[in-house]
Structure formats: C-alpha cells, structure tokens
Image (spheres, grey):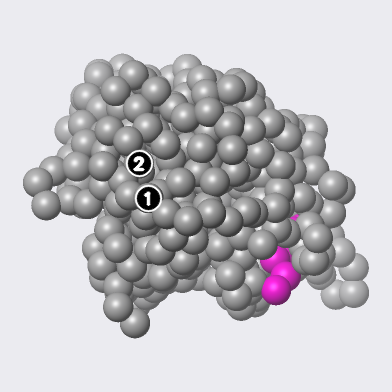
Amino acid sequence: MHKPTILPLVFVLGAALATACGASPGEHSDGFEGSNNGGSGGSSSSSGSSSGGTLTGDAGGSFGNDGGSTTSSGTYSPPTKLGCSTRAQDIVVFDFRSGWWTGGGGGDFAATALPIVSGACPGTSVDYHHFENVMHVKCLYQGGGTGSCMQMAAANTVNDILSSLKHPNVSDYTQIWVLSGSDQDPSDIPVGDALFQGVLGATNGACIPMLVAAGDGFITHANTITNDLGMGTVFTEETTPPSFFSVAELPAEPASYLSGSQMSQHLLFKGVGALVDTVKQVFGNATTAESKGDSLAASVPSGAIYEVIAHDGSGNPTIAVGAAAVGSGQAPRPFIFDSGWQRTYGLGKDAATAQYIKNIVMYLSLVGCKAAPIATQ
C-alpha cells in the first residue's frame, strides 16, 4: 500500500476546510433560524422516521416543524419548496473509493454522471477529485456541458492538492460531496491516512452543506465522518465484504427500484416516481454481477436533526436528511446521507434517478451558510 509523504496535507486541508463555516459579506443565511438569522414559517409535516432537532425556517418558502429540541445555535431550517438557488453552485466532490465515477471501479462513468450534476441548475460547476493510494483523477464540469478529466500523480505534498482545486480555498465552494471508500480495499486511502484526515479534519466546524454517500460495502469513510460529527456509526455494511462492483469494463443497468411507501413525500423525490435501488450487469442473457446498497441507522443520538426519508428493497433505511450540531455558537451542518450510491450507475438510463441527483444539488443550495433564495421562475 502506497502511503508516501502525504502527512503535511492534513494540516493545510484541515485549515482550509475550517474556514468553510461562515458566510462572507453578501452571502445569505437563509435556511437557518437562530444565530444565523433564519426566518420563520408555517407548519407542515413530512413522513419518515426522525430524531432530534426542530425543523423551521425560511429558504424558498414556508417551513415545517417535526418537533424535538433545538441545537445550541438555533434551528435547522429545511426548505419546503425546491428550485434552483439564485446563487450559482460550486460543488467539490471527493471520491475515496477506488473509483465510484472514475478510476478502476468507475472507468469513464464521470462523463455520464458529472454532466447531470453540473446541469442541475444554471451556472453549476463541479470540481471532482478521485483519490487512491497511487493516483489522483481530477475532473471539471460546468453547466451540464462537456467537461474534462485528467489523471494526476498521487498527492505527495500540500501544494499538490491545493493547486489542483478549482478555487484557492475550500470555503469558496457551496457544497461538499464525499463518496466513501472502504478499509477492506487496499487501493482506497485509509481513514487514518493524513490525506483523508485532511479532507475530513475540519468538517466539524463547517456549515457548508454536505452529501455523504456509500454503498456496495464501501462505508468506512462515511462512518468516519458521521462519528466525527458526533452522530456515531450511521452506515452499516450490508455487502460483506464489498462486492467491488465495477463499471470500468461493462456497463450497469437498473435491477430494482424504490417506489410508493418506500419513499416519503420529501422534496428530494420531487419528480422522482421511482428511484433505482440495485443495479446489475448483464452479459448475453445472464446477470454477471449485482450491486446493492448498505443501510443507515434508524435514528441517531440527540443533538443532531435526522430524518430517514427512504427505505431500500430490504426495508433498510437508505436515504436521510438533517443537520449535525457542530459546536456551540455555530450553525448546524446540513447533510444528505445516501447508503445506496450504486443507484447512480443507473444514470444515463433512468431519468428519475437523474432527477434525484439534480434535486440533491437544488436542496443543498437552499440550506447552510451559502444558501440563497430560489430563483424566480
């Protein structure tokens, strides 16, 4: 396993992410009520299991309240309307698996997935970085158009990673997406490695919204994040060991879907009648491989706001939303957790799953310290 001179990276990336917690002049704090001057709203309810926190506020319409106690700095305020924010989205994606969308597992799938992410709303750009012990792939996509990827040398110095980011500081991004790897894959950067700790290190103090995704047995990095956020172990491995499902040589196709009562009436599922659950690969008339999701906890310790909004075909919680309490006097950290990220291998073949990915971009643009109102239609 290759782990050369990456150690200094932890300190600089940690410091960079630490600055990702506050809004600079002119930024909106819509999406929070309390110390970040969120608004007020009416009441509504959403289905799905939940724990902790009060859901009230004003980003993009009126807001509901699912009960519970507030965080130390105010209340998390999810939107009750979905649309593109008036603020163009800059998304940084850290892929720690040996390839969800590039690398040995993902092949060229970035060319399918990233235009969907960047095409969610006008002006959206994606700065994607895939890390393995011996490689670094960087992709840039904007506005749903054609982007580009390049393979870079493994990050060995602080400047290697900082100079490869689109923006000079992590605080310049509006969303952070982390796609989990596994400590059972020798190609993946271990969670104790300085590179991963550098990316993770300062997320406790950041209120920029985050997507944390796992699946196919690749949950280690995801759980390191949830533990670091004080939520305990949220992801449970349902594929043991990981199946190492790869689309590098053979494309995948949807094998099963979520629908009906498996999905609550939540904004993330607006326009999504059915969502890919498991995927498979077929050669000739035979299924040669299948990939399924892992599971999420039904609830988390008090202090965080946590709502399960979808269950997979086995009845396991698979998608949750909420906010982590990141410290006294700081705004909550909004998040989306998805333990069935293999569903994204249905992109390019399933329009509803593509809409779900676009909804993630829109939803996260309306919460957190980089939130802005919905653009006039």
Q: In front: 44, or 202?
A: 44
Q: In front: 264, or 185?
A: 264
Query: Hey, what amino acid is under mark 1?
Result: Ser
For the view shown, which residue lies furthest in the front direction?
A: 42
Task: Provide residue 177's location: percent of width, then percent of height.
Answer: 43, 46
- Vertical relation: 193 (above or below) 377: above
For the view shown, which residue lies furthest in the bottom direction?
A: 377
Task: Provide residue 57's location: percent of width, then percent of height.
Answer: 40, 49
Query: Hey, what amino acid is under mark 2?
Result: Glu
Q: Which residue lies at the image location 47% right of the left edge and 17% below the top edge?
A: 192
Reading the image, the residue beneath label 2 is 33
For the view shown, which residue lies furthest in the right direction?
A: 285
Where are the magenta residues, as a range? 273-280
How many angstroms separate mark 1 from mark 2 (CA)? 7 Å
Q: In front: 104, or 146?
A: 146
Task: Provide residue 211's location: percent of width, then percent of height.
Answer: 48, 46
**Observer able to see residue 275:** yes
Q: What secondary structure characterizes most of the magenta part?
A: strand
